[in-house]
Image (spheres, helix red, strand yellow):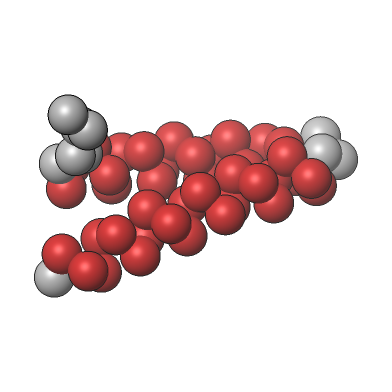
Amino acid sequence: MEHRMSDAELRKAIRVLRERADDARHRGNDDDANGIERTIRTYQEEMTQRL
């Protein structure tokens, strides 16, 4: 059975991932930041589908 994150969990995950993506960009790791941002977009899409 797959765990479905609650709205609060999704919001927290997006916030934490945004911080990690920003940190990766500041360190010059654009590939890492881009990968993290893809995950953020996936989570944001899931949030919009719930509305």
**Does residue 23 lie above or below 31 as drawn?**
above
**Does residue 42 lie above or below 12 as drawn?**
below
Q: In the rendering, at what x and y percent does residue 12 appear?
A: 30, 38
Residue at the spot x=86%, y=40% of the render? Answer: 28
**Does residue 13 lie above or below 51 as drawn?**
above
Residue at the spot x=22%, y=33% of the render? Answer: 2
Residue 23's quadrant in the figure?
A: top right
Left or right: where 9 falls relative to 15 = left
Q: In the rendering, at what x and y percent does residue 48 appear?
A: 25, 69
Q: Quadrant of the C terminus?
A: bottom left
Q: In the rendering, at what x and y percent does residue 14 appear?
A: 40, 46
Nearer to me, 31 or 22: 31
Res 26 seen here: no
Left or right: where 11 falls relative to 35 = left
**Does residue 30 lie above or below 2 as drawn?**
below
Residue at the spot x=57%, y=54% of the render? Answer: 38
Residue at the spot x=19%, y=39% of the render? Answer: 4
Q: Residue furthest front?
A: 1
Q: In the rendering, at what x and y percent does residue 11 appear?
A: 28, 46
Nearer to me, 42 or 20: 42
Q: Quadrant of the N terminus?
A: top left
Res 15 seen here: yes
Report how many numbered discs are placed on residues in the image.
0
